[in-house]
Amino acid sequence: MLALLGGLHTLTFAAPANTVPSYAPMLSQYFDEADANNPELKQANFNLEAEQAKLQSLRSRYYPSLALSARYSVSEGGRTIDFPAGDLLNPVYQTLNAQAAAMGQPARFPTVQNQSIPLLRPTEQDTRLTLKGPIYSAELNAQVDSQQAFVQAQEAARQNYREELHRDLETAFWQTAQAKAQVEVLQVSLKTLQENERVNQVLYKTGAVTLDAPKRAQAERLDLQVQLQQAQTRLALAREYFNLLRNAPAQAPIETPDTARMRSLLPDIVQELTPKGTATTPSPALQQVLSSKDALDAQTRAAQAAYTPTLGYAIEGGYQGTDYSTGPHTGFATASVVLNWPLFDGGTRASDVAQAKSRAQAVQAQAELLTRRLQLARTQARDRLQVALDSISARQAQQDAAEESLRINTRKRDAGASTQIEFLSAEQATTRARLGLIDALYQAHIEHAQWQYANRDLPDLTPPMPNGDAQ
C-alpha cells in the first residue's frame, strides 16, 4: 500500500520543472487534419469559390465581347410586289416597232411581261462578327463593388468557421485529456480500495475487526467502480466528438499531454495561460457583418445608378447575299454608339433604392448588436479564465493535504489504530482532491481556448447618445 502511494507521489511530482510545456505541435497536427477533412469547412471553401467566380463574371463585363452569327434561309411564297412593267412599256414598244417596220427595219423592242417581285428571297444568307462592350455604366461599377464586398464577407465567414472549428477542436482535445486523467485517477483509487478490501478481509479473519469492515470496504470499491465506468463513458464520448470535428473514425486514437508532467509544471502552465496584452486581431464574425454592410451599401448605389444612362459601343462586319459567294457589294460593316437611358418605370427603381437602404440599415443594427455581444463575451471569457487559473493553487493545496492525510490513515489502519470510517473518509477526500486538481488544470486550458477565440480587437460601433440624454 505504501509502495502504491509512493509511486503516485513520484508520478505526480518527479518530472523536472525547467521548461514550459508546449502542445502547439500536437494541436497543430490536429488543426491541419480538421482544415483538410472537415466537411463544413469544405463547404465554406466552395461557397467562397462560388462568390469569387461571380465577381470574375461581373468584372468580365468590362471587356469587349466578340460573337459570330450566321443565318442561311430558304423561302417560298409570301407577299409580293406587283409591277405593271408590260402595261407601261408594251404600248410604247409597239409604236416604235411599227415605225421601224414602216422604214423597212426589223422590230427592235420585245414584248415585256408584268412583274411580280416576292418580298422573300428564295435563298439568303447573313454572316457577321459583332464586337460590343460598355463605355460607361455606373450600375456595373456598383455591382462589382458589391460583389467584391460579398467575397470579403464570405472570406470572413470561412475564417470565422475555421477559428470556431479550431476553438471547438482544442476544447474537445482538453476535454478528452481531462476525461482520460479522471479515468487514471479513479483507476489508482480503485487499486487503493481493492487493497483496502484485501487488508480488511485479513483483519476480519484474524479477529481484529468485525464483518462490517470488509463489507464497507467492498461497498466503497463497488461505488468507485461505477464512477470509473461513468468516467470511461465520458472519455469515449469526448474522443468521438473530437474525431467528429477532424472527420476521423470515431475510435481513432488521440495523443494527449502527459498528466504527470503537466502537474509538475503547474506554475509555468499558469504563467503561460494567464491572459496578457490587448488583442490586435479583428473578429472575423464582425468582419463578415461589416463586409455584408459594405455590399448592401454598394447595392444601394447600384439601384441609384439605374437613374443614370449607360453608354456602349457595337461594331459589326460580315457578308450578306443570296449565297456564300464573295464579290462587290456583298460585304458590310457598321459601327454604333448606343445610349440607353430609362426615363420612366412606374416607381420600380425608387422601390429598389428604398429596399437596398433598408437592408443596409438592418445589417448596421446587426453589427452594433454583435459588437456589444462580442465585447461581453470577451470580458466573460477573460473572467472565467482568471477564475480557473486562481483555482489551481487552491486545488493543489487541497490535494497535498489530502495525500498526507491518506498516508497517515493508511499507516494507522495497518497498525489497527484507525477506524474504517476514518480511512475511507481520507481516501474519498484524496480522490476528490485529485479529481479537483485535474478538473481545474484542464478547465484552465479549456477556458484559455475560449479566451483566445473571444479576445479580439473590436471597434466601437455604439451610436452616440443624443445631447439631451448626456449626463
Image (cartoon, helix red, strand yellow):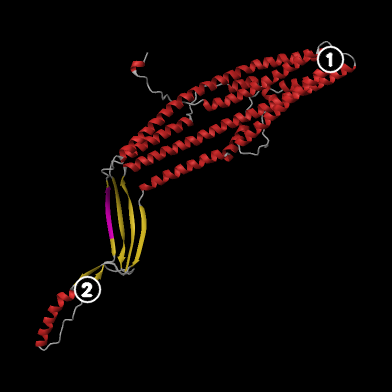
Q: Quadrant of residue 192?
A: top right
Start-end of magenta stretch? 333-339
Q: Gap between marks 2 and 1, in whole Å?
A: 136 Å
Q: Which residue is mark 2?
A: 115
Q: Quadrant of the N terminus?
A: top right
Q: Hey, what amino acid is under mark 1? A: Asp
Relative depth, front residue between 29 and 353 = 353
Q: Secondary structure at mark 2?
A: strand
First-in-chain label (2 vs 1):
2
Q: Quadrant of residue 102?
A: bottom left
Say left or right for 220 vs 20.
Answer: right
Q: Nearer the viewer, mark 2 or mark 1?
A: 2
User: In x, y percent, where is residue 390?
Assistant: 60, 17
Q: Residues within 10 Å of mark 1 (few under 14, many from 20)?
A: some
Say left or right for 207 vs 458.
Answer: right
Q: Give the total of numbered labels.
A: 2
Relative depth, front residue between 47 and 2 = 47
Q: Which residue is mark 1?
A: 414
